[in-house]
């Protein structure tokens, strides 16, 4: 199947069982990027400039994400940061300035560190839960030897003594 995302970075071909179907088939990553770009447009229009020329805004987003290879999630973070901190942006091309802003980059790194710590903690908790071994030992004297992989037969001529 052909990925419908115009800026597909995976060669354009997608397996049907791995694809996301939404008016065509998309790689998961392509679909995610497409949705993030739509969210960026919506946030910009609703919160920054309601009269922005849509074609210019779309061109800037495409240039930043697909030409300069800036992560779409980072650009979304930049737009949310601009809105949250009531920063001034007069036109969409101002996003080029803000993606290189030192304070925004520091906030992005800090956010990612926090997310990474949370993921590691979640993974550690899951590891501890899955690595617990439940083994029910009955009164069979061979259970331990079976568990440890030992053979229970004694070589000929050796007699086990009971204490």
Image (cartoon, grey):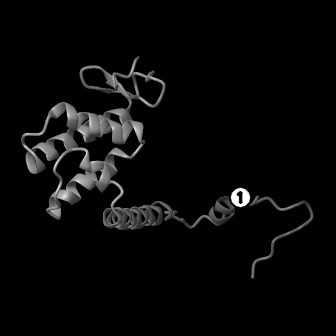
The answer to which of 96 and 72 lies nearer the viewer is 96
Residue at image point 83% right, 62% down? 154
Residue 55 position in % (x across, y down): 20, 30
Residue drawn at point x = 54 percent, y = 65 percent: 138
**Residue under the image location 81 percent in, 71 percent down:** 160
Position of 63 with respect to 141 (left or right) is left
x 32%, y 33%: residue: 31
Rendering coords of residue 20 (x, y %) = 32, 28
- Find residue 153 and report its horizontal and vertical position in percent: 79, 58
Image position of 51 with respect to 106: above or below: above
Residue 78 occupies which quadrant of the picture? bottom left
Please tell me in which quadrant of the rendered image residue 81 appears.
Answer: bottom left
Residue 22 falls in image quadrant: top left
Q: Residue furthest bottom?
A: 163
8 or 24, nearer to the observer: 8
Residue 80 higher or lower than 30, as above or below: below
Name the image quarter holding the N terminus: top left
Q: Residues within 10 Å of mark 1 (few under 14, many from 20)?
A: few
The residue lying furthest to the top in this view is 1
Residue of label 1: 149
Is 48 left, or right, of 23 in this rendering?
Answer: left
Residue 34 drawn at (x, y percent): 29, 34
- Image position of 104 with respect to 68: above or below: below
Residue 94 appears left or right of 99: left
The quarter of the image holding the C terminus is bottom right
Picture layout, residue 23 above or below residue 95: above
Total number of numbered discs in the rendering: 1
Q: Residue furthest right?
A: 157
Q: Secondary structure at mark 1?
A: loop
């Amino acid at each position: 199947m052909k990925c419908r995302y115009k800026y597909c970075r995976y060669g354009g071909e997608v397996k049907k069982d791995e694809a996301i179907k939404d008016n065509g088939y998309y790689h998961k990553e392509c679909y995610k990027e497409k949705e993030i770009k739509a969210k960026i447009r919506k946030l910009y229009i609703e919160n920054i400039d309601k009269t922005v020329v849509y074609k210019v805004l779309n061109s800037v987003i495409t240039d930043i994400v697909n030409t300069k290879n800036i992560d779409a999630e980072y650009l979304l973070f930049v737009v949310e940061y601009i809105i949250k901190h009531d920063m001034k942006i007069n036109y969409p091309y101002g996003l080029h300035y803000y993606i290189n802003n030192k304070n925004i980059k520091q906030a992005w790194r800090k956010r990612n560190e926090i997310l990474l710590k949370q993921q590691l903690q979640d993974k550690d908790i899951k590891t501890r839960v899955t690595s617990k071994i439940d083994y029910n030992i009955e009164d069979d004297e061979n259970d331990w030897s079976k568990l440890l992989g030992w053979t229970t037969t004694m070589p000929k001529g050796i007699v086990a003594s009971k204490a």
